[in-house]
Image (cartoon, grey):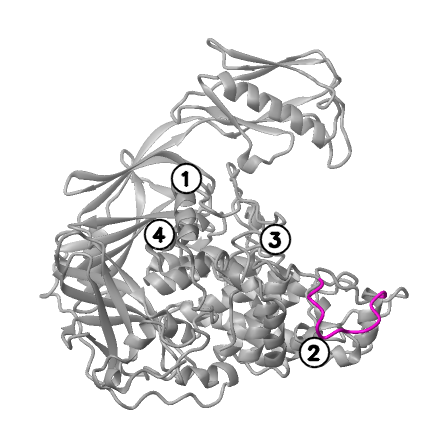
Amino acid sequence: MKKCSPIFAKLGLVLICLLSSCGDGSSGSAASNNVNSATTGTALVAPPTDPSVAITSFTVVSTATAAQKSVPVTFGQPFKAGDLLNGSQIEARDASGNSVPVQMDEVSSHLDGSVRFAVISAQVADLQANEQRVIHLYRTTSAANTASAANFSTNAFDLKLAAIVYSPQISVVTFGNRNGTTAGTPYLEGEQITLQLGDTNPEQYVLTVSAAQAGGGFQTLTKIAEGFLALINASSKKYLAYKPGGGGYENLWITPLKTDGAAFAIKFSYAGAAVQTVSQQQTYQAPHSYQATPRPVLDAMLASGQSPRLNGPTAREYTIVTPFVDSSSGTKHPQLMARLHTRFVDAGQRVRTDMVIENNWTYEPNPGNLTYELAVTQGGQTIYHQAPFTHYHHARWHKVLWTGAEPQAQVRQDMRYFLDSRATWNYNLAVQIPEKVLAAEAASLATADTSPMGTAFVTPYFPGTGGRPDIGPLPRWTALYLLSQDPRQRAVMLANADAAASVPIHYRDAPTDQPVSLVTHPGLAMRYGTSSAVDALPANTNDATVWTPDTSHQASFSYVPYLVTGDAFYLDETLFWANWNMGNNNPAYRQFGKGIVNSEQVRGQAWALRSIGEATRALPDRHPMKTYFKTKLAHNLAWYNATYPPRNTSDNNMSQIGMVEQGLDALSNTRPWMDDYVAIVLAQLAENGEPGALNYLQWLSNFTVGRFTHEASGYCAAYASIYTLLVFDANGKQITDWGALFKYNWPAVTACDPNQAIASGYPEWAGGYAATARAVLSVSASVGIAGAADAYKRWVTLTPKMDADFSNDPTWAIIQR
């Protein structure tokens, strides 16, 4: 990075240079080029001693066509280790030296006690139409400002929520009686099946079994179910047929088109020997009205002196949790809850409420999907209405509502500093995202399902194979935002984080009001609502959704959205995903309360470790689950260090060459890119000083880096990004010599050619295994793994066409720090 002109430093504008991307974009500031405790766990880089030099800056961008007198903004801000020491505060000034009211909350600390991350709230005065105002953050030892009750009024807040909960009949029709892969009594070609729906003015649908539908196995039975689905939905005026997520094989779900539709009968007329069965997943009940009234809860919090989440002269935010109560009986709904993150700004004259509606209690009775509509009023006026929809079990959704005028502005962070903080990987800021890419993303979002429980760009069937925009260290949509900070791409990123909230992986424990603890409930297994006998979950009765979640194909949905916005909704999402990754499996496999993730596929281990690390770093120091997630991460790293680095040469199932296995599975078809995923996550953990991460990474790098550095031993680097590698010989013995390993996999290659083009891994594609190889070599070099820096430089020269494609997909566009 080129140094900025001294005149900028004198003016306190040193970061103007960073914002304008002077330099080559390939590395951070001079201080960030040093390896500090984020890598080694030793001494930190000393912070600048001159308080006139800004730590970092941000830009408030007006999106209004008229001047705004007051613009309150709240956002997340990562800090480099050592830049803001424990006990320090911040102050803010604009480019003209004018003081800007600012406060810092929700602090997460580095290992040395300096601030790692904080939520920043500022109030900008007299922002002109389309103005972009740069504001610098400085350290100060002045006492933090606190808001007094006299300075803030909460009178503007009086939201009321009214829900009408419906219970339409949901029946499941099953065609045939197959048992697993064993076919049952077959349907015969030419037979007619008549399905009747309803008693009064019934609808009848007739299907003649075709040759493709004849049989008793799940393939042909599925075709029959799909045939009736098409018949019903083509002409029915009363009923809807569906298959959640397109699955369900021979099962077909049928429900009224109207959410308040009455109960109905299902009858079959069929002369053959095959079987049809009908079961009810949900019985009809008359609609019930429920209300949630958060104002009394807020009044009780104020009366008790409860500290708000954000607490300063610029913003005060309270999290108000209130149930929905039956209007007639006063009975609380067992599952439906409102969680309102209510932020008072401009001394309380304006109120931002991030309204979160949850259906995710762990042990409360009657879990399942809920169908309801919702109306929100403020001062007796309806300000939001959500039409009837189905809210999945163990899922959540949110909507931001304003009382008073919503500020028309967005915050752009100093992305160079953001990345230098090591909050995430070092994405290459020299990559320019073309307008056509951003426009295409925005156009896709415009047609995506972003309603509550919508999927946006997220693939509902997680185990699906093939290239996907969500798979990588960060999803493609998040990398695009980091490199562009385009408001359209921000909307894409947040929409996908919102979509992930509809996946049924959210388990909150009522006694703590936090994600359920695996220490308190060591026998809990969350996947699909099942559990061991200990800590048994209440059974779901209506639980069909479009989602099939897993860990091995899981994205980082909410971590960067939290870092960017500072919103509690995205922090909670980060915790839920990390907890589910530990708690969805057999409790014995994870060592019960320890939360060990090694039973996952190798790639699943990578993404699970990533999610636990995200939760650990993002959580404020005062959060009640900070220690919980820190301990879980420590348990996992201790397990890997105890299992792998002291290699047992007598164990043929233990890698002798430096790779991670899934439990004790045979290594005959090792996929190197999965190990690369693990290494990429470990490097991020090592950069952030997690004890044990670097030690384990050094062992794993024998394989992840060694594939590129052993040409002298006969292992040609041009083949290093292969999809599958055989590591056992024909006799079942593990191959431990690099030359022999290469010869066994590529017997026709007689010698390594240092100038040979890459032979596998899609070297011209930004989404291929060769791109993954670039990323693993870059992050390994950043933390000082021997040989990684030279291997990275060489790999870059061998993949020259990849750079252009990074503009379309920067998922793996990670460079050496």
Q: Nearer the viewer, residue 177 or 783?
A: 783
Q: Residue at x 14, y 59 (%)?
A: 128
Asked whether the viewer can see residue 513, the reply is no
The range drawn in magenta is 747-759
Q: Residue at x 53, y 78 (%)?
A: 686
Lower position in the chain sequence, tag 1 or tag 3: 1
Alpha-carbon span between mark 4 and mark 1: 14 Å
Snapshot quadrant of residue 582:
bottom right
Residue bearing the label numbered 2: 709
Which label sits on residue 532? 3
Does the CB distance between marks 4 and 1 fall below 8 Å? no
Is residue 757 rendered magenta in the image? Answer: yes
Mark 4 burial class by Cα count in 10 Å: few <14, some 14-19, many 20+? some
Lower position in the chain sequence, tag 2 or tag 3: 3
Residue bearing the label numbered 4: 488
Which label sits on residue 447? 1
Residue type highlighted by circle 3 = Ser
